[in-house]
Amino acid sequence: MIEGDRRLNPLYKLRGGYRHDVSAIVLDRDPNITPAQIPARAGKLDRLKRAKELGIFTLPGYGANEQLVVPGTGPTFPLTDRRRVAILGFDALTKGFIHQSQRIGQDQAGACYGDSGGPSFLGSGSGETDVVVAVTSTGDGPC
């Protein structure tokens, strides 16, 4: 089993919005897998949108499903170290952001508390790719 340490971006501020909202897991050994792709060309997402290829995404994460409020301390998010995978739809593409839909009535899920900084892969199921099109930042409350 490969283990790793979570590394949060020290520049991230909880009330700072999306700036610096990225993290990493440093593995204790080489996982012997091919790394995910990151689109290298400017305008790639615009081309995918025009081709209607920004339809569905796979979002893996280790976030918590719930927020617990501890009297005298405030909110806490119990992490289980259990990976979950969510399938999200496409909502909109704006300058700087892909807005993904989280419509439970359409069998879509959402990002959980603590999933920020993780990847969002293009496609799902047999159509899932190894192309990372976004870094997760925010989601719905109960995912």
Image (cartoon, helix red, strand yellow):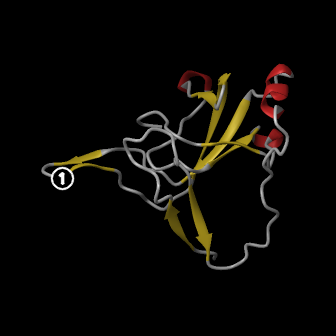
Structural crowding at the residue carrying mark 1, measured as other residues with C-alpha within 10 Å and reported as few (<14), some (14–19) or many (≥20): few
Q: Residue furthest bottom?
A: 29
Q: Is residue 52 left or right of residue 1?
A: right
Residue 39 lies, in percent from the top left, at 81, 44
Q: Quadrant of the N terminus?
A: bottom right
Q: Could you say which quadrant of the image residue 2 lies in?
A: bottom right
Q: Residue at x 51, y 65 (%)?
A: 7
Mark 1 highlights which residue? 73
Q: Is residue 85 left or right of residue 116?
A: right
Q: Could you say which quadrant of the image residue 102 lies in?
A: top right
Q: Nearer the viewer, residue 80 or 90?
A: 90
Residue 72 lies, in percent from the top left, at 13, 51
Q: Secondary structure at mark 1?
A: loop
Residue 115 lies, in percent from the top left, at 52, 48
Q: Residue at x 62, y 79 (%)?
A: 28
Q: Residue at x 52, y 47 (%)?
A: 21
Q: On screen, 135 above or below 31?
A: above
For the residue marked with disc 1, what is the amino acid?
Thr
Q: Is residue 110 left or right of residue 96?
A: left
Tally of marks: 1
Residue 108 lies, in percent from the top left, at 60, 30
